[in-house]
């Protein structure tokens, strides 16, 4: 148990420290955040438009990509507008319910992205390793089931964190040393025993994140093995190009995720976690559309087709 006075913060709420170190650069930081947020919206909405407008892209791989873009938009919209409001109005207070909701949405979207990336790995595995059975194993019905499972499971499992943390007793300080409500900075404020939250964190980490990561690694071991058996270099290049975008997104996403969450809360470092949270919450939603638009040939064709129709 931590020392300090106990009180229930549900009535008074929290204060978000935000990027107070950049208080002298408030307007430039706001403009940067605004540009980043607009870029995220435009990039991911472009993904939506191109896929929906091109019937050739109405296949499981791109259905998963649409949902990944939706998760990215919610992911960024959950953080950046609040951060920009803090930068402009200097109003740092957030209600208890608002804080718990923001944390819940952040965790749910993180889990959704994990499961969608896992589903996309399975899709690439079937397409490359079992191409003759692809239409049977990855029918639109199976695709819809995987998507529905990813969203439903993510919102359900994230309830555990929200409930456990909402029941914590907090100390005198209610200043969250972060730019949004996340598990680690909230646990630094509590006077309660956090072992139940730690257990939930590791259960969720192993059950969802680690298992999905292992599944993706094993899938790519089979994928790479199959690609290497292709005799022509052009055939190997085409086969690998169909999964290179997904693999790049997986590396970036899991790299930041492991640095953020796969460690005890006692090792929490505000400045380091702010940096990696910024990468996870901002860089990934920006990069995902860029990576897919640059590396995927079918998507390039779809973009050119949509552009030519708009210019006519």
Image (spheres, rainbow, N blue to C red):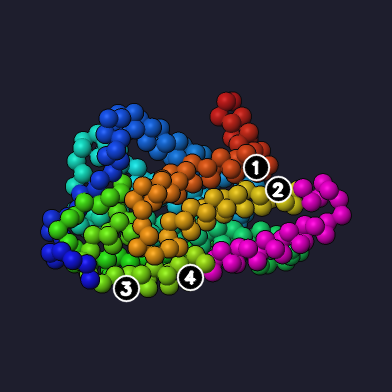
Residue at 28 percent across and 50 percent down: it is 177
* Image disc number at residue 206: 4
Q: Which residue is mark 2?
A: 241
Badge 4, how many Cα within 10 Å: few under 14, some, many 20+?
A: some
Give the distance between the C-alpha atoms of the residues marked 4 and 2, in whole angstroms. 30 Å
292 vs 191, nearest the viewer:
191
Q: Is residue 163 left or right of residue 62?
A: left
Residue 306: image quadrant is top right
Q: Which residue is mark 3?
A: 195
Q: Secondary structure at mark 2?
A: helix
Residue 125 placed where, x, y %? 68, 62
Q: Nearer the viewer, mark 3 or mark 2?
A: 3
Q: Earlier in the sequence, mark 2 or mark 1?
A: 2
Residue 141: image quadrant is bottom right
99 vs 189, nearest the viewer:
189
Q: Is residue 184 left or right of residue 306?
A: left
Give the distance between the C-alpha atoms of the residues marked 1 and 4, in whole angstroms. 31 Å
Q: Earlier in the sequence, mark 3 or mark 2?
A: 3
Report the magenta residues as a range: 211-237
Give the distance between the C-alpha atoms of the residues marked 2 and 1, in whole angstroms. 7 Å
Is 289 placed above or below 261 here? above
Q: Is residue 237 left or right of residue 61?
A: right
Query: Can the viewer see residue 55?
Result: yes
Give the distance between the C-alpha atoms of the residues marked 3 and 4, in whole angstroms. 16 Å
Q: Earlier in the sequence, mark 3 or mark 4?
A: 3
Badge 3, how many Cα within 10 Å: few under 14, some, many 20+?
A: few
311 inside magenta stretch: no
* Image disc number at residue 295: 1
Q: Secondary structure at mark 4?
A: helix
């Amino acid at each position: 148990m931590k020392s300090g006075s106990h009180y229930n913060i549900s009535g008074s709420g929290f204060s978000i420290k935000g990027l107070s170190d950049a208080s002298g650069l408030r307007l430039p930081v706001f403009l940067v955040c605004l540009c980043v947020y607009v870029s995220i919206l435009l990039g991911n909405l472009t993904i939506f438009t191109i896929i929906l407008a091109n019937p050739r892209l109405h296949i499981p791989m791109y259905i998963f990509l649409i949902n990944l873009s939706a998760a990215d938009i919610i992911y960024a919209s959950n953080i950046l507008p609040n951060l920009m409001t803090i930068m402009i109005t200097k109003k740092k207070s957030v209600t208890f319910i608002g804080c718990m909701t923001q944390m819940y949405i952040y965790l749910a979207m993180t889990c959704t992205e994990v499961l969608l990336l896992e589903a996309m790995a399975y899709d690439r595995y079937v397409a490359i390793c079992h191409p003759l059975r692809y239409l049977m194993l990855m029918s639109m019905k199976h695709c819809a089931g995987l998507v529905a499972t990813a969203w439903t499971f993510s919102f359900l499992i994230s309830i555990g964190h929200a409930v456990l943390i909402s029941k914590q007793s907090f100390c005198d300080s209610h200043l969250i040393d972060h730019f949004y409500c996340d598990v680690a900075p909230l646990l630094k404020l509590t006077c309660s025993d956090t072992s139940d939250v730690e257990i939930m964190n590791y259960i969720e980490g192993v059950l969802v994140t680690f298992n999905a990561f292992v599944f993706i690694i094993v899938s790519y071991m089979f994928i790479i093995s199959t690609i290497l058996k292709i005799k022509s270099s052009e055939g190997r290049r085409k086969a690998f190009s169909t999964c290179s975008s997904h693999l790049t997104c997986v590396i970036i996403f899991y790299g930041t995720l492991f640095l953020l969450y796969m460690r005890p809360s006692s090792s929490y470092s505000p400045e380091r976690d702010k940096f990696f949270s910024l990468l996870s919450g901002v860089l990934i939603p920006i990069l995902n559309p860029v990576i897919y638009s640059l590396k995927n040939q079918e998507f390039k064709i779809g973009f050119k087709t949509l552009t030519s129709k708009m210019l006519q």
